[in-house]
Amino acid sequence: MRRRLILLFLLLLGFDAQAHHVLGRPAYSLNEDSNTPPSMQVETRIGKYYATFMAFPAFPRPKERGRVNLYLRRIKDGKPFAGKVTFLVRDDRWFAPDPEVIGTQDPDDNVYRQGFVFNKAGDYIITARFQADGEPYTIDFPIRIGNPSPVGPLGITVIVIVLLLVSVNVIQRRRLQRLQTSRHHAEERT
């Protein structure tokens, strides 16, 4: 009897439990964004509105789909904004070209969702623009796509300047050494 219980116990241990739901949702409805936290969540106050911005997935990569979510609520009464929001994007660098419109969205369940795909890794600024009560609103959000080069244009400029200073220093030292050597030889001749 004891052997049978041990055998039954070992057999039960051998079966894997297959989960059908994750956190109360069916497993077949999950996708790459479902359990991924946002890469950034920013909450701010702008004019008469509270704005909450989120970017998905947590680590957006070049040539992969991502999206931003924007929630807008009036400070006074908590009522969600119901107008259109235009999303723009530009490089976060000096002398970047003008922003490019990536879409205009209507609210979907009080959320403005805008998809994006970036071809190159880098730092970008996503801008949300809307008008409410005759006033224009602009909200800028930074977003990093992939792992951009750690040395940007400013870093390259600093490296070039340092290399230039070092090479000038080396040339001046050699010139000074030649001058001292020629003086030394001139003193030995006299």
Image (cartoon, rainbow, N blue to C red):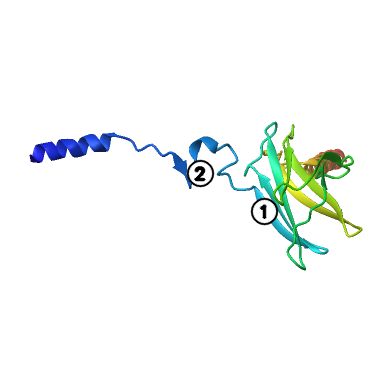
Secondary structure state at the residue bearing disc 2 = strand
Q: Quadrant of residue 151?
A: top right
Q: Quadrant of the N terminus?
A: top left
Q: Which residue is mark 1?
A: 41
Q: Which sits in the foreground, 189 or 118?
A: 118
Which residue lies at the image location 81% right of the left edge and 54% below the top edge? 139
Residue 35, position in %: x, y? 55, 44
Q: Quadrant of residue 77?
A: bottom right
Q: Is residue 37 above or below residue 32?
A: below
Q: Which sits in the foreground, 119 or 139?
A: 139
Eye-nearest disc, 1 or 2: 2
Type of the residue with mark 1: Gln
Secondary structure state at the residue bearing disc 1 = strand
Residue 133, position in %: x, y? 89, 60
Q: Is residue 100 left or right of residue 45?
A: right
- Numbered circles on residues, count: 2
Q: Which sits in the foreground, 177 or 40?
A: 40
Identify the disc placed on residue 25.
2
Q: Is residue 79 above or below residue 54?
A: below
